[in-house]
Image (spheres, rainbow, N blue to C red):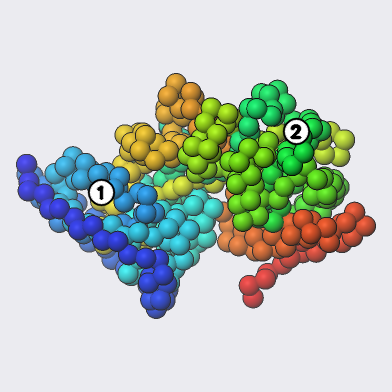
Amino acid sequence: MKAKKIGALMLTSAIALSTVAGCGAEQANSANADSKTSETATATAGDAAPAAETQDVTLKIWVPEEEVDITDEMVKKFDEAHDEFNITYEIAVVGIDEAPQALGTDADTAADIFYTPSGGVGDLAAKGLLLPITKDFDVLAADLPESAINAVTVDGLTYAVPFSPNTFFMYYNKDFFTEEEVKSLDTMMAKDLGDGMWNFSTQFTNSWYAEMFFLGNGCTLFGEDGTDETNCSFNDANGFAAGQYMIDLAKNPKYLEDADGVGGSAFKEGKLGAVTSGAWSAPEFREALGDKVGAVALPVANIGGKDVQLSNFVDFKTITVKSNTQYPLCAQQLAVYMASQESCLSRYNKQGDVPVLKSLSESDEIKNDIVASALNDQAALATNQPSIAKMGDYWDPMKAFGVGIYNQEITEANLQAQLDALVDSITSTLTE
């Protein structure tokens, strides 16, 4: 057994990374081509030799703060299992949302392996900043749901390894609602919970939440498959009905806008019947309310005279490799291992990230976890968040629309004009 090097654990901030100078995708592709050619030649020579030599590999890995310790463990286990590599590594703290921007700022100094939401994979791939994941991915592919594979596939190539679904669902207080009542938002809103109480809270003013009424009522963003940047149907008849429902809900005194966390706070204080949030809220909700906490997929709502299933965006937490890494073979294999069954189960047990792998999500351990079960149930009802670059033009206009609804500046009288303006803002090019 070869001697192993212990990688240095290095904590940095995303702020410092944002100050480095830019580097073009063309340079990244050129550097990647050179490194892959060199590594291919080495691999070919190794095939011809009696025994493959151990390759010294240096990798930089970016992870969210909560992932530092578990990533350290994963890299050490991978290194011990692969005699062909002798890995020296650095782990830096960079948030999952900050990493793509830092990569685009300077690909040369960026990490070889980093976390990113699947919604940004298409844009990064189009800019030539990601390496397709081909080595060992077939080991996981059969265990991944089709939605997860589609979320990281661009022009037939897989550019990231999904490991956990990311979407919101609904928590409710069992003292106020039954399992049957939480199936319908209108049933919930009709119930009298008493003075000083709210029945339901979500975030009209957050464009990652406000879409659930439109998508639930059959509207599409960037077409049926999320790739047509000229297409958004939020202003058709279904969109108008969704807007009307939001207007009525915002005016209802039993509704609480979850701005700046007030919904979550009211829920923990026992003053709110139900709130939309994700798995990240489970520890604090359970600490405050104990066994009173229930978790389910989003309810149906009666929009335009018919009950429709509310459908939000789902994306996936993924592990990616930059295109100009000097060690593409090792980096790909490590990225796949970091999303393997062993790694995902460890991540779930230690920090609650629900695995996307079917072999784990369908296990009794996950199904008996009400939060994990709610997340997976909602992920199955959700709409894949478009991963095209145009998605960047959605967030601000949709937030402004939601603010207008919440502030009651958007009324039924001006709703159609506001929806037309929303769609125009989303589908026109705001960044030019």
Residue plotted at (70% across, 33% down):
299
Of helix, strand and loop, which one carries label 2?
loop
Q: 297 left or right of 356?
A: right
Q: Which kind of residue does numbered mark 1 sit on?
A: Asp
Task: Provide the residue designation for mark 1.
Answer: 72
Above or below, comparing residue 291 to residue 427 in the picture: above
Of 266 and 8, nearer the camera is 266
Numbered mark located on residue 131 in the image: none
Mark 2 — residue?
193
Lower position in the chain sequence, tag 2 or tag 1:
1
Q: Is residue 1 above or below residue 113?
A: above
Whether residue 308 is visible to the viewer of this picture, yes or no, is no
Check disc 2 and give the amino acid type.
Leu
- What residue do we see at 66% from left, 23% from top? 179
Q: Are marks 2 and 1 in contact (CB under 8 Å)?
A: no
At horizontal 6% and vertical 41% (from top left) the residue drawn is: 1
Label 1 residue SS: helix
